[in-house]
Every structure is written in structure tokens, then in C-alpha cells.
Amino acid sequence: MNSHNDTRLKETTDSVALADDYCCLVVWNDDVNTFEWVIQALVEICGHTEEQAEQCAIIIDSRGKYAVKEDCYETLKPMCDAITDRGINATIEEIARS
């Protein structure tokens, strides 16, 4: 019986760990969206300054993608959805723990 309780505790602990995992919001380059559109999205959705958003857009264009924000999944998910709703490719990736 004790092992059943241990399993339930592990599942609960794993769920809490997932909720606390630090993630990054990655915006991907494409040939459709303009710099201005991406910059506007980063300012309005992620709270970037114009300068930060412009720097992110340049990096996205040159590298193909860029992690524009880091936070917990629950914070980044609505931002990711709002960016993709604007037609900009974005994903959330878990940051590896050391």
C-alpha cells in the first residue's frame, strides 16, 4: 500500500515541477511578416520597448529564430497564442536545467 501512496506523491510532484519549469518564447523567421508587424507584436504582447523589439526582430531575421521572452509556461502560453493569432510563428520551449 505504501508504494501506491509514493506513486501518487511522485505524480503530484512531477505536475508541480512542470508548472514551475522555466521556458522561453521563441519567435521564428518567415518570408511573410514584416519587421514592423513583428516589432508591434513584441511591444504589445510581450511588453518590449521599441528598441528591444527591433533588436529581437533583427536577430530573428538573421538567425531564423530567437527566444524573445523567458518565464514560466503559464505566463508564456497566452503570449504565444496571441503572437500566432497574428500570423507570426512562435513556440514555447523548455529551458534545460543544469
Image (cartoon, rainbow, N blue to C red):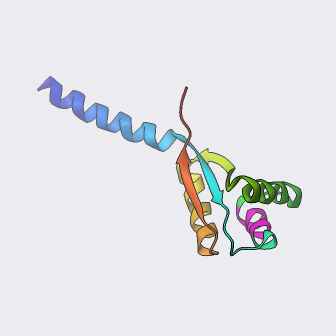
The residue at 68%/56% (across/down) is: 64
The residue at 74%/62% (across/down) is: 42
Residue 6 x, y percent position in the rendering: 23, 27
Residue 16 x, y percent position in the rendering: 42, 39
Residue 86 x, y percent position in the rendering: 64, 75
Vertical arrangement, residue 22 with respect to residue 39, above or below: above
Report which quarter residue 38 is drawn in: bottom right
The residue at 79%/66% (across/down) is: 39
Left or right: where 98 falls relative to 67: left
Magenta span main SS: helix
Residues 87 and 60: in front is: 60
Residue furthest out toward the left: 1
Vertical arrangement, residue 78 with respect to residue 67, above or below: below
The residue at 76%/55% (across/down) is: 62
Left or right: where 37 falls relative to 5: right
| Magenta span includes 60 | no
Magenta-drawn segment: 38-45
